[in-house]
Amino acid sequence: MDPYSTHLEALVETAMHSKGPILELGCGHYSTPVLASICAAQERKFLVQASNEEWATQFTEIADVELVDWSNWTPPEGKWGMVFLDSEEAVRDRIKRLPALAKVADVVVMHDANVAIKNAEWKSLIQDYREIQVFHKHVPWTVVMLPK
């Protein structure tokens, strides 16, 4: 299996069972078209935030895309039914968004969990989550996290 697609099972299952708008942090050829299709079929808002303009512009026809600077990122306004965290930055930096996402999302899906879980900060960053399900059938792993 392509390592860039190992999140699909968790992503699709979670998106189909969540309600409300979906926020994707980062974008890609596997996740973005799938999430865009689910949102279109269910008449849900879909927003993609990414830092690489060249990469992100590939998806402007199927999603609302905002360019962001991850170094001073804050969550967009509102409550999100699901957030997919797979931004272009290193996993050690990406996971620092978990506390903020717990406040604005009903559920968070994060790719590269096998790397994140080994990070020294992991336990302190997931304190605002009541349940974490690890999808480890394929590497890299994906986690689905329910905030408290």
Image (cartoon, rainbow, N blue to C red):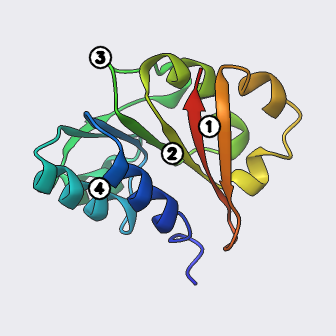
Distance from the alpha carbon under mark 3 to that under mark 4: 19 Å
Name the spot of residue 119 as percent of width and height, x first. Answer: 84, 40
Q: Residues within 10 Å of mark 4 (few under 14, many from 20)?
A: many
The residue singled out by tag 3 in the image is: 78
Q: Nearer the viewer, mark 2 or mark 4?
A: 4
User: What kind of residue is marked 2?
Assistant: Ser
The part of the image, by quadrant, that contains residue 126 is top right
User: For numbered disc 4, what is the local secondary structure?
Assistant: helix
Pointer 3 or 2: first along the chain: 3
**SS class, disc 2:** loop
Residue 60 located left or right of residue 147: left
Residue 60 in the figure: left or right of residue 101: left
Disc 3 vs disc 1: which is toward the camera? 3
- The residue pinned by badge 2 equals 87
Q: Look at the numbered discs 2 and 4 and tell me whether their residues touch, using CB distance below 8 Å.
A: no
Image mark for residue 35: 4
Mark 3 near mark 1, Cβ–Cβ under 8 Å? no
Q: Residue 109: x and y, percent? A: 52, 45
Residue identified by numbered label 1: 94
Mark 1 secondary-structure assignment: helix
**Marks 3 and 2, how far apart in space?**
20 Å
Q: Which of 122/94 is in front?
A: 122
